[in-house]
Image: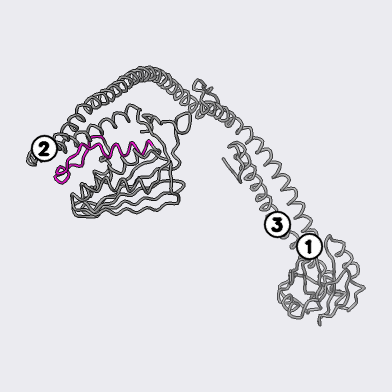
Amino acid sequence: MVVGGTRVSFRTLLLITTAIGLLALAFTSSLATAWVTSQRTRDLLLAQGTQITGSLARQSVLALLYQSGDNAQEAVRATLAFPDVRYVALLDQRGQILYQRGSGPAAVPTAWELAETSISDGPLLIREDGEAWHFVAPVYTHSGEDGAVPAYAMDQPTPGELLGHVYVVVAKSGLHSIQAKVFTNNILISFGVALLLLLASQSLLNRLTRPLSALAGVMQEAANGRVTTRARPCGPREVATIADIFNAMMDALEASHDALRQHNELLESEVALRTRELVAARDVAIAANRHKSEFLANVTHELRTPLQAIIGYTDVVQEALEDEGLEEYAGDLERVLNRAQHLLSLINDVLDLAKIEAGRMELHLEQVNLRRLLQEAEEGIKPLIQKNGNHLTVVLEQEQELLEIDPGRLLQILFNLLSNAAKFTDHGEVGLHATLSHERLELKIEDSGIGIAPEYQRAIFDEFRQVDGSDARYYSGTGLGLSITRRLCQLMGGDVAVASTPGQGTCFTVTIPLPIELVGPERGTTKESALAEV
């Protein structure tokens, strides 16, 4: 438990609470006992003061009768001999002091106070302050037993003539002394009893908390990972029951731990087995993919040679027919030549893809004038732009004239994106915006064509994938152009992104960081892309 930012044990907290409770109980009982004793002592002292004042009144008859204080000297001296009697005075019928002894108060009793005592026929407490009690008793004349001397008798029901009053002041110093002694003794006795109770409580707490502390230590060891630790059932029955329950829980936990360890060992062996199987399957897949890429490269290479021969011979025959004026047959050969060129383009795409997957695609970095390269791309794509009645706009923003890049691969990227834009746009706008800085080359190819739906924008860069739908099916193609474009951008350390809205057009953005880093040992050598990079 945390008290005031400091962690305190349960035993210490309970001991402190018990000590505070016992001390508070001792102090409260001392105050109560002292108050009761003080009230009883006050009542006794008041009764004593009343008795002393009455006795002085009976002995002061002659002094007041003859108005002579000498006759009361013995009575006054005897009254002052009592403890705490501080002042004695005899007052005549007018309330004037006839005789006094001791340290007098600041004022004598008033006429109203004296009249009140005359009615009472006996001693009366007329005033009380923090230092003393003030008693007054009336003095009357009565005949004595011999008839010669008047006597004062308080017991007779019919009083005689009022001669005056006696005034006695009794100090409270005795009461205060008794109160202090009673309180001191009570507090000492109460604190002593509280200390004994505290020692007894500590002994009882030790019997309870020691087993709990031992059990807490065992639990802490278990929390630190020692599942074999056990508690010793001892102490009160409840603590022993807790220890038994803890031991049963630890037995179950140890059994679960053993079962889990065995399960982990079995799982590790299965994982190792499955891992070896996956590695073997991966190696087989990699080998199969490599063989596939090599097969595609060899097949496409073998197809290109006869196809180029066909294109060459067709071109020669076409020129011969045109020279002889056989335009009808020349037109047929023109269609054959176009299809052959289209087939050669498809074979070249497959060959490029095979090279990339086989890791044999090479970059040849050269110092290139970007403006001239864009003009070359514009001239090469112009027939396809004009075929669909489109308009091409080329904009160049550059901080430098030259950049080091593979011009053939950059032209291939531009041709692929521009041909896509021209193919899917009919009597619209196609724009090429190039930005060259020291840090990067950015190419934006925008069109106002049919656009691409959001759900197909991620799939257009996959091999042999085209957007489904009647609009897309209308246009021919193998679905390799965008895939090869992305692979070439990644080969140069960049990438290509697409943003499109159906019916409004498409924008492809190519970003290539500069300078292009080579993986070869020397700058200017060819770069072979790794499979992980593409």
Mark 1 / mark 3, whichever is N-terminal: 3
* Residue, disc 1: 172
Q: Nearer the viewer, mark 2 or mark 3?
A: 2
Decide which of 348, 167 is in the foreground and name it.
Answer: 348
Task: Tell me: residue 193, above or below residue 38.
Answer: above
Q: Nearer the viewer, mark 1 or mark 3?
A: 1
Decide which of 274, 189 is in the foreground and name it.
Answer: 274
Q: Could you tell whether 368 is left or right of 134 in the image? A: left
Q: Which secondary structure, mark 2?
A: helix
Q: Are marks 1 and 3 in contact (CB under 8 Å)?
A: no
Mark 2 / mark 3, whichever is N-terminal: 3
The residue stretch that appears in magenta: 463-491
Quadrant for residue 145, please give it. bottom right
Q: Could you tell whether 323 is left or right of 88 in the image? A: left
Q: Quadrant of the N terminus?
A: top right
Measured from the top left, where is residue 507 in percent x and y?
29, 50
Decide which of 29, 136 is in the foreground and name it.
Answer: 29
Extreme-bottom residue of the structure: 94
Q: Amino acid at mark 3?
A: Arg
Q: Quadrant of the C terminus?
A: top left
**What residue do we see at 77% from left, 67% from top?**
133
Measured from the top left, where is residue 308 in percent x and y?
21, 30
Q: Amino acid at mark 1?
A: Lys
Measured from the top left, where is residue 174 in percent x and y?
80, 58
* Residue, disc 3: 40
Dot 3, crowdedness within 10 Å: few (<14), some or many (≥20)? Answer: few
Tell me the number on the disc at residue 321: 2
Mark 2 / mark 1, whichever is N-terminal: 1
**What residue do we see at 14% from left, 34% from top?**
317
Q: Could you tell whether 517 is left or right of 214 in the image? A: left
Measured from the top left, where is residue 5 in percent x and y?
60, 44
Q: Which secondary structure, mark 3?
A: helix
